Each structure stands twice: as structure tokens, then as C-alpha cells.
Amino acid sequence: MAREYAIGTDDVENNNETRKCLNCGYGLSGLAEKGLCPECGVAFGDEIVLTGFKNKGGPSSNIITGIVIFLLGSMQLWLTLINAPYLLTWDILMATLINPCSVVGAILLIVGLRGMSTAGRHGGDLRWVLNEKGIYTIWGSNSERKLVPWDEIKRVASPIVLGIRPRRWRVLKIRRSWGSWDFFRRRTPMLWIKAKTRSEIRDLSRMINDQYKM
């Protein structure tokens, strides 16, 4: 059965992401904890599953940031409504809607709300699934599984977290091999994990590197 270290759960085998073949997507529900996929023959059951967020603070940070930026972009509208609501015009309303701050704020708000929905189903909006092929990064419930092969990975590191409240969040980072590129970190996002100590994350990264001989 897949081992889930980042978030303790007794219901890992019922999780849709860990009960589908990572190679072909064939449903593995009802089969043994370990075995070969009936569809493609790839082994399953020895994966290590890490669950967290792709952003520090999780989706709630996107929601808060989105609200703040949206309010800044809508400042002219709010001032008009507070001081002279009778002067509200269509031009002011349209200028608020197309204001770059309003647009960015609305996008972050939508992303945050979607992340909250995903986190409710998975305990986080990003999952690393490690097996003999490499690290699969999975964003959300229906997203494409992006494989990072081991030959493209130098090691899994646990860099020091800098910030106002560093004790709350720890991070695992995929350090790529020389010549391995990943623009915008689409396949190698950092995994932010909440409520873990520095030593726990360091031990976890060491265990991954030792098990897969990096």
C-alpha cells in the first residue's frame, strides 16, 4: 500500500490518486495492496506519497492575497460608493473591472477557492508520488500527472525556510541534474508541508535520497 508520510491517514488505499495506475491510469480499487497493473503490467503498491501545497500557506494564502489586491484595484469604486454614491457611473465601474489590480486579484481569488476545494478532497493541492520511475507531481484531482525521472533529479533537498513564521512551514525541493530544465517549475514544484519540524523534513529527504540512491 502506498505510504503517506506528510499527512497521516488510515484511508490511503481509498484515495483515488493512489489507487490508479500511475503509468496508464487504470483503476486499482478492489485489487491487492501490491501487485502488477492488469492493464499495462507496471508494479504498484510501493509508492511513497507526500501531500502538501505548492505555495507556502496553501490555497488560503491565495485567497487572502487575491482579496487584498482586488480591494486595492477597486479603491476608486469604494471611495465613490462611500463619499458620493450618486456620482457612480458606468465608466467608473468598467475602469474598476479592467484595472490590472482587480484582474490579478480576481484570478488569485478564483485560484485560491479552487485550491480550497481541492485541499478538502486531498488534504493539500499538490502531491508527490515516488516510485522506481521517479517523482510524479499531481495538482488537484483531475490534473495531469507530470513525471520527473530519477535521472533528471540530483537529489531531494530540504532548504531552510525564511519568513516571519518559519516554524509553521517546511519545504521539500527537487534539485535537478545538470542539463535538466523545467521552465516555470511545472514538473518540479516545491512541496510546502505544514506542521513539520526541521528534523522531520530533513530525515524525510535523507530517506528519499537513500532509498532511491541519489
Image (cartoon, rainbow, N blue to C red):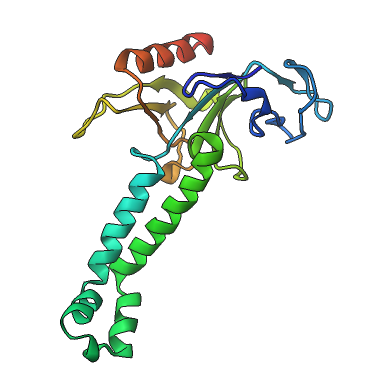
Q: Quadrant for the N terminus, please.
A: top right
Q: Is residue 57 above or below residue 198?
A: below
> Considering depth in this image, is 146 or 152 the residue closer to the camera?
146
Q: Residue furthest left?
A: 83
Q: Is residue 157 above or below residue 97?
A: above
User: Left of 100 or right of it: where is 191?
Assistant: right
| Residue at the image position 23 percent from the left and 90 percent from the top | 86
User: Left of 168 or right of it: where is 153?
Assistant: right
Q: In the picture, residue 165 is in which quadrant?
A: top left
| Residue at the image position 31 percent from the left and 52 percent from the top | 64
Q: Position of residue 208 (x, y in %)?
A: 48, 15
Q: In the picture, residue 183 is in which quadrant?
A: top left
Q: Count up the numbered dots.
A: 0
Q: Is residue 198 above or below residue 68?
A: above
Q: Position of residue 177 (x, y in %)?
A: 44, 26
Q: Position of residue 201 (x, y in %)?
A: 37, 18
Q: Position of residue 69 (x, y in %)?
A: 27, 61
- Asked whether the viewer can see residue 214, the reply is no
